[in-house]
Image: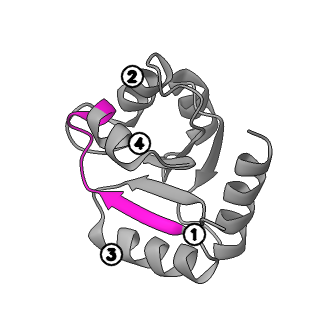
Amino acid sequence: MTPKKVLIFDDDIELLELCTVILEKKGYAVATTDNCSDIVNKVESELPDIILMDNWIPDVGGIQATQTIKSSHLKKIPVIFFSANNDVKSLAEKAGADAYINKPFNISDLEKVIADTIANN
């Protein structure tokens, strides 16, 4: 069986490495990028089952990047918005994300939100 693929957009290289280790141990395939320039092509080249989107990702930012994905032919790919912002829930809603998680996050919470979001989409 092909593993589910997670595409992570975040400019924190250490966080990308940590998430990659955590998610690969859970059986996911992981791709990462530290910016959201040319977002549609990046998502098309990976065709992930789910996307983790940082709010403060360089270039256009997580809200606009998520809106771009959700207004394209890739809109069925669920996006989990994640941020250290106090109001990540409203940012995720504004972006059109399918779910959200606060940073810093508990590893089990990250695993659960990804599994639940994939199961519900």
Above or below, 94 relative to 5: above
- Is 110 within the magenta? no
Residue with the mark numbered 4: 55
* Mark 3 vs 4, N-terminal side: 3
Query: How far apart are the two marked residues, 3 and 2, measured between alpha carbons?
Result: 26 Å
Residue with the mark numbered 1: 28
In the rendered structure, find residue 104 and report the number of the disc placed on it. none
As shown in the figure, which amino acid type bears the numbered disc 3? Answer: Glu
Q: Residue at x 27, y 35 (%)?
A: 41
| The C terminus, quarter of image | top right
Q: Residue at x 25, y 55 (%)?
A: 34
Q: Residue at x 36, y 31 (%)?
A: 65
Query: How far apart are the two marked residues, 1 and 2, measured between alpha carbons?
Result: 25 Å
Q: Secondary structure at mark 1?
A: loop
Q: Secondary structure at mark 3?
A: helix
| Nearer to us: label 1 or label 2 | 1
Pointers 3 and 2 in contact (CB under 8 A)?
A: no
Q: Secondary structure at mark 2?
A: helix
Query: How far apart are the two marked residues, 3 and 4, measured between alpha carbons?
Result: 16 Å
Q: Residue at x 38, y 49 (%)?
A: 46
In the rendered structure, find residue 14 and report the number of the disc placed on it. 3
Query: How far apart are the two marked residues, 4 and 1, measured between alpha carbons?
Result: 23 Å
* Mark 4 vs 2, N-terminal side: 4
* Mark 3 vs 2, N-terminal side: 3
Residue with the mark numbered 2: 68
